[in-house]
Amino acid sequence: MEQTTETQSQQTEAEINTEAGGELAPANTKPQWQEQIKPAVDVFSKLPDYVGQFFADYQQPLLTLLLIIAAIVTVRVTLAVLGAINGIPLLSPVFELVGLGYTAWFVYRYLLRASTRQELASEFNTLKGQVVGKNSQKS
């Protein structure tokens, strides 16, 4: 019975010794690869703070730049659609006639008489007040 207990304790010691697996490194020493990537990890850990601060500082110019790019894309798409419409036979002359007809109606309706010109100016000022605001409206 004593041999069994003694054999078990030897097996336990042997298991412990096999788990160590070689020379032990001091506990406070980091592997070399961790020291090499530490600067990169520091930069990437601070990156969200830098990006957030950048967008906070330059929010207005970035928004302006984004709006300019959106306007350019919109103009390009509009010109492409108009180019495609002009390629359809008889559609371009019809649109020209519609445009000329609307221009003639607008001149007749709003620009020939002084009273209708005042009505147009009043409607324009009302629309401007709705878009820009009431305080910026000057009479």
Image (cartoon, helix red, strand yellow):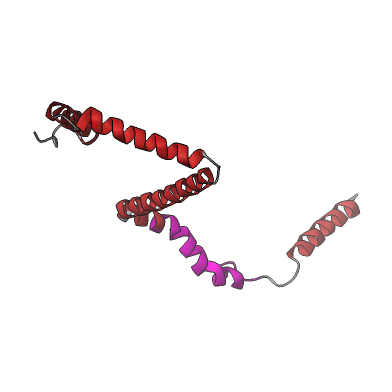
* Residue 31 visible in the picture: no
Against 120, is 14 above or below? below
Q: Residue 61: x, y in percent?
A: 31, 55
In the image, is 118 to the left or to the right of 99? left
Residue sitting at x 21%, y 34%? 128
Asked where in the image residue 12 lies, by quadrant, the reply is bottom right
In-front residue for pair 38/93? 93
Against 115, is 63 above or below? below
Q: Residue furthest left?
A: 139
Read off the magenta span: 25-50
In-front residue for pair 18/99? 99
Residue sitting at x 51%, y 43%? 85
Q: Quadrant of the C terminus?
A: top left
Q: Residue 79: x, y in percent?
A: 46, 49
Q: Residue 35: x, y in percent?
A: 55, 71
Residue sitting at x 46%, y 64%? 43
In-front residue for pair 15/98? 98
* Residue 5 visible in the picture: yes
In the image, is 98 to the left or to the right of 19? left
